[in-house]
């Protein structure tokens, strides 16, 4: 169906809904690269004006990627909850923004409509929202998940400890893990991106993390971020796997590029559940996403990169994950050019995921060929803290020596806690106090060279 | 002069022997000490410079000639660094004029080498020649006539157009990788058998992080020699060609 707006004497035409969404999207290099972006500032505003008038119901009738061609579209349509949608079904996209911002639209109401919203509706409304709107509404959404601790409580912030090493040296990884724990990080997960995909190497990583966890009775969960099929193999081989990880995207073709499908993810989810390792809950999946992956894999079907990203959240929510993480600035400047674009994308991803009911975190990050630096990351980190982000990354000194990019550090997490008064996952917080790593207030204590963890952890991991 | 020390130090510095990660940095309040902020800033500045500094092609050409290599010079469709960063598709395509120029050159006797600036000119400037020399000692071919093509604003796939125009059986692209803070000068190596425009990335083999502190020249040359021989023998490259050189590589490393 065509859409149009008249500005002065000029009539702007948009051939279909996906074109309208793409032209209404805030400027970013990936949409220019794909040839989908608005040609002028006025055309972008014309698209936003037309988009504001589109009834939400329209999104149920006009699929951006045909139902027959794409299993993610089928998932979105088949899982749509008409009863949850009913209270907002009379609204346009513009009305939806207004409704979201109402004071009476509180956490409970937002949670109640989540299953009635499709990713495309959520992407659409985000394109009409300013950064402060994205923060304000996301802050109202509460998504609480559990495995061995409780994540996502209001006023809390968790950290994924990311102790990567370029050759998967167990001693090197343990050293970074120790550094993070002594800085009070690791409640979201301790998650290693391995350099290798060889099963024996990966088995050692799972075993080391599990030994450390058990020895010190840490209420945490571990993860090795290798391909999901490798994790299924490892489960069969008896690996102590807490969380199963996979990178996912918003189209079937892009997921195929990642070597996954909904069927494979279902198999992995069931394998992880079968281990029954969670003590407080059974949220066993960890997903990563990021704008630009669909274009990068040639699987975007002419849909803009932000809308593709939000469709990935439909995949995520099918599997009740413990953690979802947008690795926002990792992909490079051809998709998100500079600090401004990265900050906007980070806030969009967090808002859209939270509105759809996902436990969203963000890898606040950039590469050295992007026009961004640590000041931009400080800005995004602070904004996401204000928006109620569930978790961020903790990497020694913010420098990932395996993946060659910069993220956030253990110190950055302390900064955010300090400025915004954010607490750790309660069970993990209590453990830190028991271990004399923190004071009862949550502040770090001075760690002496005789500290229990410092003396014993390197021995357990063979680093002594 | 009295040293003022306001930093709360971490008594686990010795664990740095196991990793180059920035551990045990200490803190002032909850923040990084000044010293660490500046160290990080310097590393980022060096990585940024690595991305934006142009490769000195005339100097490299001079060095290659002195070492007995035959060189050619081409450029991609990306006219400048800004375009290169925003339009990866332009950096993958050999410029039309250069394609014609290569088609009039002597064909590659067997392999063609491409040295592309990529995302780190300094990686190519430092490591390409020593690596080529290490490869020449191992890999037997008509080196005097093997073209070493210097490619400006090039991405990996520019090797396809170059290899095709020079009618090479195998193209080896040596390219500056995306620089990290601790590794602004990593060189990446990509092998493609029967190169032609439109080759898929799954048809390539990659050797990453070539630099003295990463994968040293001798070891990289050993892997490259192994993969090149296997690719020519099996007449393929990519996912079907496995790097089984590691057992032998251990011996090389121990030498």
Image: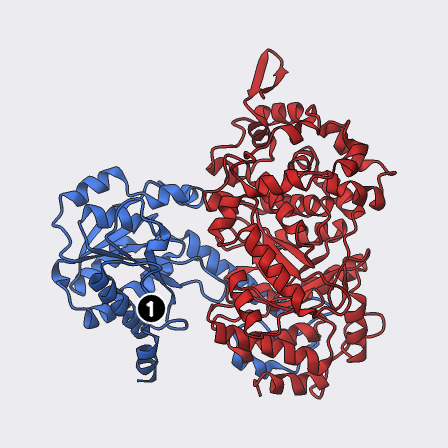
Which quadrant of the figure contains the N terminus of chain B?
bottom right
| Residue A55, position as x, y percentages in the image | 71, 26
| Residue found at the very far right of the displayed protein | A104
| Residue A385, position as x, y percentages in the image | 74, 54
| Residue A230, position as x, y percentages in the image | 51, 65
Whether residue A198 is visible to the viewer of this picture, yes or no, is: yes
**Chain coloured blue:** B
Element class at badge 1: loop
| Residue found at the very far top of the displayed protein | A9
Which residue corresponds to the image point at 61% horizontal and 30% vertical from the top-left? A24
Which quarter of the figure has residue A121? top right
Q: From the viewer's perspective, tell me whether residue A57 is left or right of residue B203.
A: right
> Which residue is the site of mark 1?
B243
The relative height of residue B168 versus residue B188 in the rendered view (above or below) is above
Estimate how packed mark 1 is, as few (under 14), some (14 to 19) or many (20 or more) residues with alpha carbons within 10 Å: some
Whether residue A407 is visible to the viewer of this picture, yes or no, is: no
The relative height of residue A345 versus residue A176 in the rendered view (above or below) is above
Front-lying residue, A163 or B35: A163
Which residue corresponds to the image point at 54% horizontal and 53% vertical from the top-left? A330
Colour displayed for chain A in the image of the structure: red
């Amino acid at each position: 169906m065509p859409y149009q707006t008249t500005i002065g004497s000029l009539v702007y035409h948009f051939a279909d809904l996906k074109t309208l969404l793409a032209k209404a999207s805030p400027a970013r290099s990936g949409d220019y690269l794909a040839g989908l972006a608005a040609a002028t500032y006025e055309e972008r505003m014309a698209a936003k004006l037309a988009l504001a008038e589109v009834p939400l119901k329209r999104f149920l009738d006009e699929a951006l990627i045909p139902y027959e061609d794409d299993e993610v579209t089928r998932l979105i349509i088949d899982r749509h909850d008409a009863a949850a949608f009913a209270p907002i079904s009379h609204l346009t996209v513009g009305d939806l923004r207004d409704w979201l911002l109402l004071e009476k639209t509180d956490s409970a109401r937002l949670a109640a409509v989540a299953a009635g919203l499709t990713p495309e509706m959520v992407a659409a409304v985000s394109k009409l929202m300013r950064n402060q709107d994205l923060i304000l509404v996301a802050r109202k959404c509460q998504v609480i998940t559990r495995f061995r601790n409780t994540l996502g409580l209001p006023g809390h912030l968790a950290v994924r400890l990311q102790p990567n090493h370029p050759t998967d040296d167990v001693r090197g990884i343990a050293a970074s893990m120790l550094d993070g724990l002594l800085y009070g990080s690791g409640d979201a997960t301790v998650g290693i991106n391995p350099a290798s995909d060889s099963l024996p190497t990966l088995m050692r990583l799972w075993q080391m993390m599990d030994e450390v966890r058990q020895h010190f009775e840490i209420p945490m969960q571990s993860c090795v971020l290798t391909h999901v099929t490798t994790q299924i193999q490892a489960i069969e081989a008896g690996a102590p796997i807490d969380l199963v990880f996979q990178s996912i995207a918003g189209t079937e073709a892009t997921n195929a590029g990642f070597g996954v499908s909904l069927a494979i993810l279902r198999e992995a989810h069931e394998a992880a559940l079968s281990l029954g390792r969670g003590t407080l809950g059974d949220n066993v999946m960890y997903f990563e996403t990021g704008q630009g992956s669909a274009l990068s894999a040639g699987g975007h079907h002419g849909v803009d990169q932000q809308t593709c990203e939000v469709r990935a959240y439909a995949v995520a929510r099918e599997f009740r994950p413990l953690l979802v993480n947008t690795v926002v600035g990792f992909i490079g400047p051809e998709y998100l050019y500079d600090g401004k674009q990265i900050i906007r994308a980070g806030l969009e991803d967090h808002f859209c995921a939270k509105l759809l009911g996902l436990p969203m975190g963000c890898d606040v990050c950039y590469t050295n060929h992007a026009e961004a630096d640590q000041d931009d990351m400080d800005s995004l980190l602070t904004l996401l803290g204000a928006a109620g982000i569930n978790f961020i990354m903790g990497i020694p000194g913010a420098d990932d020596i395996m993946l060659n990019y910069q993220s956030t550090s253990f110190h950055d997490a302390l900064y955010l806690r300090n400025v915004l008064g954010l607490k750790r996952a309660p069970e993990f917080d209590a453990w830190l106090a028991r271990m004399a790593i923190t004071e009862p207030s949550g502040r770090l204590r001075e760690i002496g060279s005789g500290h229990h963890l410092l003396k014993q952890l390197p021995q357990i991991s063979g680093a002594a | 002069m009295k040293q003022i020390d306001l930093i709360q130090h971490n008594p686990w510095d010795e664990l740095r022997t196991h990793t180059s990660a920035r551990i045990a940095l200490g803190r002032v309040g909850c923040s990084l000490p000044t010293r660490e902020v500046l160290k990080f800033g310097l590393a980022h500045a060096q990585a940024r410079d690595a991305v934006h500094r142009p490769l000195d092609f005339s100097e490299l050409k001079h060095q290659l000639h002195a070492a007995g290599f035959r060189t050619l010079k081409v450029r991609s469709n990306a006219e400048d660094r800004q375009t290169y960063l925003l339009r990866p598709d332009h950096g993958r395509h050999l410029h039309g004029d250069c394609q014609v120029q290569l088609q009039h050159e002597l064909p590659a006797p067997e392999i063609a080498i491409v040295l592309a600036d990529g995302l780190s000119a300094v990686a190519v400037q430092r490591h390409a020649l020593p690596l080529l020399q290490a490869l020449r000692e191992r890999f037997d071919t008509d080196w005097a006539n093997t073209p070493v093509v210097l490619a400006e604003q090039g991405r990996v796939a520019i090797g396809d157009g170059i290899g095709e125009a020079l009618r090479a059986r195998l193209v080896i692209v040596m390219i500056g990788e995306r620089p990290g803070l601790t590794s602004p000068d990593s060189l990446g190596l990509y092998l493609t058998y029967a190169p032609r425009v439109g080759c898929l990335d799954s048809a390539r083999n990659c050797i990453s992080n070539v630099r003295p502190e990463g994968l040293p020249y001798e070891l990289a040359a050993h892997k490259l020699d192994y993969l090149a021989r296997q690719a020519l023998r099996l007449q393929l490259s990519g996912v079907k060609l496995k790097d089984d050189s590691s057992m032998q590589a251990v011996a090389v490393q121990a030498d």
